Image: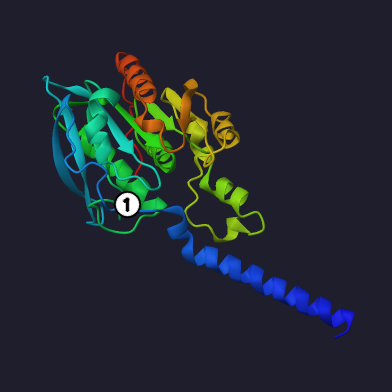
Amino acid sequence: MNTSKKVVVTVGVASFLWASLVSMIAASQRKLLFNPTLIREVQSPRSAGHRTRAVVLRAKDGTRLAGWLMTPNLPGPHPAVVYFGGRSEEVSWVARDAGTLFPGMAVLAVNYRGYGDSRGVPGEEHMIEDGCMLFDWLCGRSNVDKARVAVVGRSLGSGVAVQVAKERPAHSVVLITPYDSILALAQRKFRVVPVSFVLKHRFESVKYASLLSAPTYIVRAASDDVVPHSHTDLLVAQMTRVHQDEIIPDSDHMNIPYLPATQQKIAQFLTTQFAVTRPLPETAPSAA
């Protein structure tokens, strides 16, 4: 085989392998992005500082969503929190730790579609739509102060929290190991693949960051090999209401929400913010 034919064959093989890689990523992106955990992290979740009960809610399309509602033992109305978990996170642990993380607050933690006991298939569009529904449902509780409802999102869930806070009148926002966009993270990981052409679930928080009007607390891990600080920097640069941007010592991407230091700082931020009552916007929130 002469040199020109070898070049043609080599280019052809390389092109085939590249096209195969692109096709594989396009076909399996849901599995690459979402990693549903079905087994409860805590078998019998119960908050020492709350009344805890399992809840089953129905999404707009009727999909069954399961999680927990924690309400303080004292009479309301209470400030409240809607929690959104990470890529592989089953949220029963939030019910266990709510007394430390969210003292004196009502808390709603519901698993994404396909996670825990929730049915359906995860996807960005449904996560945002379901998140807005959860926010509205919590605001409708008689023992919840609808003017003081915060959203808290961890990792993948930070992208959900940002978009819900854009669509709904969140009083405060907490973002744990947040990113600028899943698209940007994917482009960093798959440098030779035209990710922007094949990625459906982009979670482009950076596009919405400037629209958030609520005080926001950014919580970073000291060592994070999933969301590099540079990607958090790009998000923060677009935000106008960053109240605090903090690194938790001795933390990494996986252990950060469980650390006492993290839980105490989040509790302190939310308690301080909830002491300030801000009027709800005059216009109704737009549909998700």
User: Does any portion of residue 288 appear in the rendered image?
Assistant: no
Q: Which residue is mark 1?
A: 37
Horizontal and vertical percent position of residue 105: 23, 24
- Secondary structure of the residue carrying tag 1 is loop
Task: Please state the horizontal and vertical placement of residue 69, each as a whole percent of the image.
Answer: 18, 36
Q: Residue 122's image quarter?
A: bottom left
Q: Position of residue 133 (x, y in %)?
A: 27, 43
Asked if residue 199 lies left or right of residue 2, the reply is left
The quarter holding residue 238 reads top right
Q: Is residue 32 left or right of residue 99?
A: right
Most foreground residue, 218 or 225: 225
Q: Locate the N terminus and report the quarter of the image it occupies.
A: bottom right
Can you tell which quarter of the image residue 85 is in?
A: top left
Between 79 and 1, the residue placed more toward the observer is 1
Q: Residue furthest front?
A: 250
Residue at position x 18%, y 32% in the image: 70
Residue 85 is at least partly visible in this image = yes
Report the amino acid beneath label 1.
Thr
Q: Residue at x 49, y 67 (%)?
A: 27
Q: Is residue 25 above or below residue 249?
A: below
Up-down relation of residue 213 to residue 192 (above or below): above
Quick one: 192 or 81, which is closer to the camera? 192
Q: Is residue 268 left or right of residue 52?
A: right
Question: Between residues 16 and 237, which one lies in front from this camera angle?
Answer: 16
Q: Taking 169 as reference, is 42 left or right?
A: left
User: Which quadrant of the rendered structure holds the C terminus?
Assistant: top left
Percent across and percent down for residue 145 are 21, 24
Identified at 47% across, 64% down, the residue is: 28
Tally the marks: 1
Mark 1 is surrounded, within 10 Å at the Cα level, by few (under 14), some (14 to 19) or many (20 or more) other residues, namely: some
